[in-house]
Amino acid sequence: MSRRRLPNGSWRDSTLTDEQIVGRVIEGDSAMFEIVVRRHQQRIYRTVRAILKNESEVEDVMQQAYLSAYSHLRDFAGASQFSTWLLRIAINEALARVRALGRGDNFDAHPEAEPVIPEHADPERQASAQELLIHAEAAVDELPGIYRIVLVLREIEGLTTAETADCLGVSEEVVKVRLHRARILLRESFAARIQANPKDFFRFAAPRCDRMIEMLYARLTAT
């Protein structure tokens, strides 16, 4: 891969679609890949984090996902949106890491069992908006994996039921059931209290993105 990088901030000005950028990268303009990395880094981060729940693993898995996507760009057939294709790669990388680490969070479980409703939070406890946000993020982390990933994709990232099903390799009905049960798990504790915007959950700040892209390019140029 060429060592050339895009000028700082120029990726924001791109009006090219993901598919057009992929075409440019395949033709040899490898620096353009940074545009799709930055364009989708927030969604990829939230999704990978929803699976791993471990910040020390997240960035490495994100890099692996981008490396895998870059090396298989010619395999992108356009049957789905590039963003969905990329997200599916990231999910697979994250699930592979979970399995390799032997963690107990079972993303292959069936959704038949009714979820356990968490205990009510003390209604007398008052917290700032930031504290509520931290509390809400912790509650999302505590969801069983099969519900957590669906909640993040549907409610935070705004994917459709069909897109979520495509990314996870399950039916749309399964997505609907898991989302419904995820909402049940959260509703009792937070519906009456939380005011934070879910879009603010699990932010992947710009400095982290810059650092990750530097590391990503270093790994790409080494191959």
Image (cartoon, grey):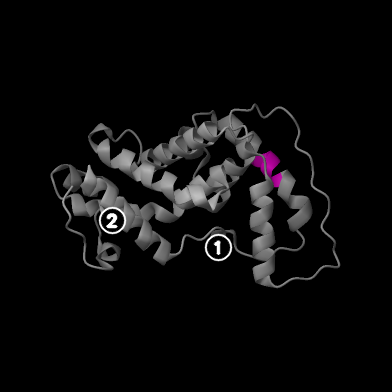
x and y, in percent, of residue 42 in the image: 44, 55
Along the horizontal axis of the image, is 78 left or right of 133? left
Horizontal side of residue 192 vs 161, given as left or right:
right
- Secondary structure beneath dot 2 equals helix
User: Going from the N terminus, do you reach mark 2 or mark 1 first?
Assistant: 2
- Which quadrant holds residue 12? bottom left
Range of residues picked out in magenta = 179-183
For residue 186, above or below residue 116:
below
Residue 158, image x and y in percent? 51, 50
On screen, residue 196 versus residue 70, left or right, reads: right
Please give the residue where the numbered disc 2 appears in the rendered image. 35
Say which mark, if any, is on residue 200: 1
Q: Is residue 145 at all visible to an observer of this figure?
A: yes
Amino acid of disc 2 = Ile
Judge whether residue 212 is colored magenta: no
| Label 1 crowd bin: few (<14), some (14–19), many (20+), radius 10 Å | few
Residue type at mark 1? Asp
17 with respect to 122 (left or right): left
Labels 2 & 1 near each other (Cβ < 8 A) = no
Residue 209 position within the rendered picture, expressed as x and y whole percent measured from the top left: 39, 60
**Residue 140 percent coordinates (x, y):** 65, 50
Image: 7 above or below 121 = below
For the stretch drawn in magenta, the main secondary structure is helix
